[in-house]
Image (cartoon, coloured by chain):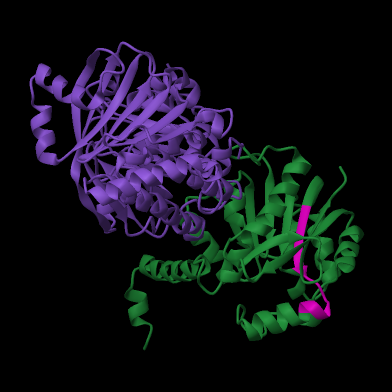
Amino acid sequence: MASQAKERRTQDTGPDTDEVLTADVLVIGGGLVGGTLACGLAQHGISVLVAERDDPAGWMSNAYDGRASAVALGCQKVLDALGIWRHMGEACQPIDDIRIADKNAPLSMHYHRHEAGDEPMGYMAENLVTRRAIQTRLGELEHATLLAPVEVIGTTRDAHGVEATLADGRRLRARLLVAADGRRSPTRETAGIGTKGWRYNQDAIVVTVEHEAPHNGTAIEHFLPAGPFATLPLTGNRSSIVWCETPAWTKDLIALPDDRFKAEFMARFGDHFGDVRFVGPRFSYPLSLQVADRYTDHRLVLVGDAAHGMHPVAGQGMNYGLRDVAVLVEELVRAHRLGLDVGAPDVLRRYGQLRPVDNAVMLAATDGIVRLFSNDWQPLRLARTAGLAVVDKMGPLKKLFMRHAMGTVGVIGGVPRLMQGRAL
Amino acid sequence: MSAAPASNAPASSAVDAELAKFAAMADTWWDPDGPFKPLHTFNPTRLTYIRDNAAERFGRDIGQRHPFAGLRLLDIGCGGGLLCEPMARMGFDVTGIDATEKNTKIAAVHAEQSGLDIAYRCATPETLVAEGRTFDVVLTMEVVEHVADVDAFLHSCGALVAPGGLLIGATLNRTAKAFALAKVGAEYVLRWLPRGTHDWKKFVKPSEFAAGLRAGGLAVDGFAGMTFNPLARTWSLTRDLDVNYMIAAHKPA
């Protein structure tokens, strides 16, 4: 109920309003990363306005976003500490087992949760489940206001604060502007911050399937010459499929009639889960690597996809966005509790120095994996199969890889407190 | 250059020009990489000490949005407002005084720009004592080493603390190490501060600071040192009182 009451709809006010809303922080974009950041700030007494373009009513429909995201253990702790996980945990599937296979080679690397500890390595969370949980949590927080759907038509930043103007005439004022508005972030573009990167010769088809046999919490990544084909476990006998193909072929595949699409799918998926039924629509997404030239500017911070976008091969896109959140919340809360201006350059400095480096490590890793596996050159294929088999046999190295992926070690600048499940 | 242009100019434009001048000076005060950089770098350490002592004395939870709501705070020697603004954000009802009118004008302009309600006055502690004012928290940070009569000054500071209230002071110790670091190092070698900022002979020993406060009816709670780590370029709270140190005291209820 609280979320309903605090959600301001554009239709509530006329187009020529001179209403001004003020908070400490203004977040543009109320998606997975921007929404989580807003929860983290508001929970610690920092007032926040979230301007979201889309209507939350649409988040109730599976047609909005068919993707599911891997939530590494360290990031699950962040969502838990910020009061979001309790609204979504039951709808998330623990990942107990990860198998990696190369083309038609036998399963050549195998991670099991017991090799790295008692907890699962992470969870699969459907993006819509996470969005709704964030929306519910925002509604519980006194210092958070979600404005949706609203259109931001301009932002200005000066020495003392930032201001955004909405299409309905309202103005939003804060001390810090956060760009959480995705890969093509208009906020980033308005600020004149460029990006570097490249488009992969792959698109991802994302579908959800229901299958006869249980998946037992196993995630399977199968490297095919055109790109990876990932089977990611969801609750019940369901899996989320991320299927990478060349952009031209993807377009043709998506348009196929049901029976022919299923035949193409089964040729890659195999029959080890019995018969398969598609749940919900087919989606396709272009794949690219992109990194912003800098993560901070005067009274501006970039987070999540606005700062960095990577290939989904390692399932780390959302996780690295949540790492941004964990570090930024910690820095801003420390400053806020000393009464400092949360938009001051010295407050943003650490985030601006640390996050690009930590993200670059994973961007480079995902790019390397994609280049290493997405081809069919025989010598390279033999070498990588041997490599996977060697790592599989080396306990300590494998354990380190696992813990790194889980986000419990190896965060540049130290593992943030929220990722350790500790209070601020 | 007779008076004609000035008398023809609307009064408000003269005020605007005056404000613009102070706004420009405020930008300088508040630039973390500007001439007041040393104050900005050690501000978080000072703020931590003040906040934690106040939270303990008044039983406040620093996790709250405005933990010190309802408490009055006086900052003596407020300068451009580098302490007053954080204190106002933490919920204190803040008064800032400074002996230099330029400073209080700069501070007032900046507080307005920051959307903070802070009462700034060009006044001495003695003026406020004469008015019978008292405050829950009195700050006198980096001031006592510049005053002519330390004991009289501390007596006035103490008189401004309400019963049950807190006083936090900060200054430089009169030691050889302080002479080397704070005088020669900061003014001549590192050029953090303009030459002549400090007169080493006027630095105040912790025992003298404590004695001055006790004479004014305060009870001393403790001291903390502030030490600069040149590699990390950060300040931290230590037990070393040889150079920069702070003192906490309270007035028994």
* Quadrant of residue B43 within the rendered picture: bottom right
Magenta-colored stretch includes residue B175: yes
In the displayed structure, does residue A134 sit left or right of residue B70?
Answer: left
Query: Chain A is which colour?
Result: purple
* Quadrant of residue A115 within the rendered picture: top right
Q: Closest to the observer: A192 or A116?
A: A116
Q: Closest to the observer: B123 or A137?
A: A137
Residue A338 coordinates in the image, percent (x, y)? 61, 50
Magenta-colored stretch includes residue A96: no
Residue A278 coordinates in the image, percent (x, y)? 22, 17
- The part of the chain drawn in magenta is B167-178
Q: Is residue A410 visible?
A: yes
Q: Is residue A24 visible?
A: no
Residue at left offset 31%, top offset 39%: A312
Q: Is residue A337 above or below residue A348?
A: above
Chain coloured green here = B
In the displayed structure, does residue B28 sit left or right of residue B145?
Answer: left
